[in-house]
Amino acid sequence: MCTVGGGPDIGNIETLATKDYECLDCKNQFKGMGRRPMCPSCKSRNVKAV
C-alpha cells in the first residue's frame, strides 16, 4: 500500500537487529545493519563485524 508522506511501517525501530562493526579505514566502531553497512564517520564501506 502506498501512502503520501509516509514510509512503510517497520514497527519499533529499536527491535531491529543491528551488529557491531569497525571501519578498517578510520577505526571507528559503530552499530550497523544491512548487507553493506557504511561507516557514519568517513562513509567507507570497508568495514568488518566485531
Image: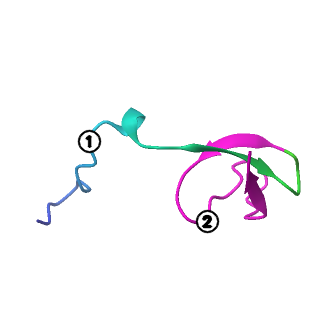
**Which range is magenta?**
28-50
Q: Which residue is mark 1?
A: 11
Quarter of the image where one finds residue 43:
bottom right
**Residue 29 x, y percent position in the rendering:** 76, 40
Q: Quadrant of the C terminus?
A: top right
Numbered disc 1: secondary structure: loop
Residue at image point 78% right, 64% down: 46
Residue at image point 62% right, 59% down: 37
Q: Quadrant of the N terminus?
A: bottom left
Coloring scheme used? rainbow
Q: CA distance from mark 2 to mark 1?
A: 22 Å
Give left or right: position of 1 versus 39. left
Residue at image point 41% right, 33% down: 14
Q: Can residue 48 be found in the magenta stretch?
A: yes
Categorize mark 1 by other alpha carbons within 10 Å: few (<14), some (14-19), many (20+).
few
Q: Amino acid at mark 2?
A: Arg
Q: Which residue is mark 2?
A: 36
Circle on res. 37: none
Give left or right: position of 13 versus 33. left
Q: Can residue 49 be found in the magenta stretch?
A: yes
Residue at image point 26% right, 56% down: 7
Relative to 14, residue 45 above or below: below
**Residue 19 x, y percent position in the rendering:** 60, 45
Give left or right: position of 28 versus 18. right
Q: Amino acid at mark 1?
A: Gly
